[in-house]
Image: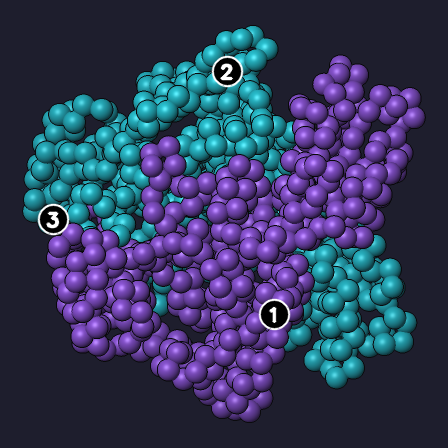
Chain colours: A purple, B cyan
């Protein structure tokens, strides 16, 4: 039977991801760059499907959520107003002996806002690199925003940042969206896009990276509705990740205590997933109060309050923010989908993706590279390729091609064989059961649709 | 009848784009940032549809093209190898009187690689800002790549660039894709993503921006097939933009003469569109020869040649590159779609988008904000929202709501009125003809599908 190995390690996932074209080290031929990872052909389709599923659930299915697509580089005043220029920092120390640089909290083993606490602890701590004790510089703050210069002069007047989160652009466009979309409170603005964090120590494969992709919803509500909307979105996010096919036993809510959440947040929670390195944040949901619109209003000098026609009152909306990273979801989905199974002497590796997120839905495989089979298989490909991400593969033995499709999680394989030339039918193989059935080519699109729905 | 105004100006498009939520100035509440533009709710859906159409045509419909999604920040050696560090430059001058900075070619009125030619001309040229003559500094090269630093130290060892084009990441991953996807020459790798160019003088709305989104295909071929593949993709790109609904009369091929193309390109062509400021590049197609893989092979020390099993020969593939900007396409599509029409005393503005790219496919409009109509209209919304981007709008007169949907290009409006409560039917209004027909709610999804196909 299909089963997950007792200890599915990150190394197994890294190896599969590279071998099968899901994830490569960015610019690997140049030795890579720490904290940057590229999606290969199947990873690209996987993340496309994740984005599409999210957009359907968080935008299209909602009568009062609209999309937005703002730039990565914005006027830097936005990040002063949001507090990122001052507070988006990690504590950093150097070892004076070996010149290596570390996150103070990682070396100390605890987190605090009081830098002197790190200095106390580190005075008697070994350097993780060279082993020398007590050689650390005093801890200091390091801002994690990447800096650049816009325009032809590199000076303070032209300094700008790569956004550390997509949310900022949403708050800055709150008024424009309100005026052009005619939404009324409650309503939401959703965005998918890249964000950048100059992590001192990126790691755990694609879990902690310097260039990431976020899917964020900012849902604007009356202050007195914030608690119930927070509870509603918290559950909605959990239902959505379960619907994607994540293993239920590996998911849990982790409510933040007061000292764990941002000073402005009234409530916040993580949906954690049990990755190979333990339970870690997958999805964050927060009641951010009126902090964001108040700060952006102060910073810009614009009035970002809302006039409620029904109650004739004016207020600064509260914001409920569900925020998730595409990469972490992709990693959790690969981890959840991974199974191994003994078939005779061999081990069959299968990524049991939900068909909605599987990178390839159907593979069309001529039994051999024959001058009669290949053209017929191409016809079958063309029948399906308009509707489903379909792959065409004509080399190697059919058994090896099945195993390859299993490893990338393709739900269905369609084999065109010599009988096909006579009976105008093909064999459809099911990924999970390996059962095969004969289907007339004329009825194939309908059969594929029904079979995909049966997973 | 519908007609395009004699001179549809950029100002008209800028104004419509802002008023109706297609395009806003980035971080506008802070005074914006030159060369950066955000997509509002309808612009976001428009560009989502453009990307999806491109991906279907250039990836899914092709049996031998795979996708890729590489990072914006890559190992900087990649951009040394590609030549961007040395040659991705614009000629720049300052006016010593007013300290304004200009593109030398813009002020001189011609382009040359010989900087001294600019100096000769500019010695007798007025400053476009202060009007003083002959006050320009000597022309010098300005590199258009945005710079940043990766890791906690800002020095030359940690310098990196924001990619100036998506193609570089494709060439760097050529080997990994070849090995994991099992493609054989000819095959292609496609990518959609952001690129950054620190333009000295951004302008023409979203035509020349500093943060852009590209859709690029790199199609790898045998050297002796490059000419025919180049001709094939040139036509395929033209057919695709015509299929999106761009005005045929505003499109033309512009073949580059030898001195207009990159030194390594054997052939290149632009598909130009007649924007308000004249015919300008929309789509670029180039035969880049073996330049890219040769350079990346030299830079990385890896062998990026290909062994052809059929002919037992080894060669560095040639590359055919069709490359297009999402923003320029969005601008051309809005421009092509824009029509004005006299209806009685009023002027009706309609964006006649092809339904495939229209931001909203169907608007569901209860005739009035009535406690019986609104719940029924919500039911109708829910029937459609899973399949089509559907909008729900319940305020203002029905006439004004129709006009608003016309201006954002919504093909169909579904009105729920008081008769609907009795006859379980709704009125469907066609954007272009304004004709209305009564449709049973139970048959609505089928009717919508047929009507959308009729445009």
Number of residue marks: 3
Tell me which residue sits at (81%, 47%) in the image: A451
Q: Residues within 10 Å of mark 3 (few under 14, many from 20)?
A: some
Please name the residue that numbered disc 2 is placed on: B307
Q: Distance between the residues labelled 2 and 1?
A: 49 Å
In the displayed structure, A214 sits above or below A414; it is below
Tell me which residue sits at (18%, 75%) in the image: A120
N-terminal-most mark, 2 or 3: 3
Considering every residue shown, the one lying at the far front of the view is A345
Residues marked 2 and 3 touching at CB (< 8 Å): no
In the displayed structure, B193 sits above or below B219; it is below
Please name the residue that numbered disc 1 is placed on: A238
- Mark carried by residue B343: none
Image location (x, y in percent) of residue A224: 52, 89
Task: Identify the chain of the residue marked 2, using the numbered disc in the image.
Answer: B
Please name the residue that numbered disc 3 is placed on: B99
Q: Distance between the residues labelled 3 and 1?
A: 57 Å
Q: Which of B73 and B308 is in front in this view?
A: B308
């Amino acid at each position: 039977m299909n089963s997950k190995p007792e200890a599915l390690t990150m190394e197994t996932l890294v190896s599969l991801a590279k071998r099968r074209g899901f994830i490569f080290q960015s610019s690997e031929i140049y030795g890579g760059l720490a904290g940057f990872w590229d999606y290969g052909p199947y990873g690209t389709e996987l993340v496309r499907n994740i984005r599409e599923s999210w957009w359907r659930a968080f935008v299209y299915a909602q009568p009062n959520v609209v999309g937005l697509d703002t730039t990565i580089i914005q006027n830097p005043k936005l990040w002063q107003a949001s507090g990122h220029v001052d507070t988006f920092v990690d504590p950093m120390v150097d070892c004076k002996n070996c010149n290596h640089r570390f996150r103070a909290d990682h070396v100390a083993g605890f987190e605090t806002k009081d830098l002197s606490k790190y200095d106390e602890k580190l005075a008697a701590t070994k350097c993780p690199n060279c082993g020398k004790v007590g050689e650390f510089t005093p801890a200091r703050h390091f801002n994690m925003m990447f800096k650049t210069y816009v325009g032809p002069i590199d000076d303070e007047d032209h300094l700008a940042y790569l956004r550390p989160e997509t949310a900022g652009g949403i708050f800055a466009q709150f008024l424009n969206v309100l005026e052009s979309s005619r939404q009324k409170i409650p309503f939401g603005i959703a965005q998918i896009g890249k964000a950048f964090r100059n992590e001192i120590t990126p790691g755990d494969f694609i879990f902690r990276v310097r260039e990431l992709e976020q899917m964020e919803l900012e849902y604007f509500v009356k202050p007195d509705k914030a608690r119930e909307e927070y509870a509603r979105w918290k559950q909605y996010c959990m239902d959505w990740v379960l619907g994607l096919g994540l293993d239920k036993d590996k998911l849990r809510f982790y409510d933040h205590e007061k000292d764990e959440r941002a000073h402005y947040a009234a409530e916040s929670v993580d949906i954690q997933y049990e990755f190979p390195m333990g339970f870690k944040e997958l999805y964050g949901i927060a009641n951010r109060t009126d902090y964001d619109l108040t700060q952006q209003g102060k910073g810009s000098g614009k009035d970002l309050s809302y006039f409620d026609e029904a109650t004739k009152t004016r207020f600064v909306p509260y914001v409920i923010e569900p925020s998730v990273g595409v990469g972490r979801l992709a990693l959790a989905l690969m981890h959840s989908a991974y199974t191994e199974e003994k078939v005779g002497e061999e081990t069959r590796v299968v990524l049991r993706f939900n068909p909605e997120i599987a990178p390839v839905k159907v593979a069309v495989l001529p039994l051999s590279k024959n001058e009669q089979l290949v053209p017929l298989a191409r016809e079958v490909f063309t029948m399906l390729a308009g509707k489903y991400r379909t792959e065409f593969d004509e080399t190697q033995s059919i058994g090896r091609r099945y195993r390859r499709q299993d490893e990338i999680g393709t739900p269905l394989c369609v084999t065109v064989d010599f009988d096909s030339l006579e009976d105008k039918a093909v064999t459809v193989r099911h990924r999970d059961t390996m059962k095969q059935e004969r289907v007339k080519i004329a009825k194939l699109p309908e059969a594929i649709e029904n079979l995909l729905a049966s997973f």
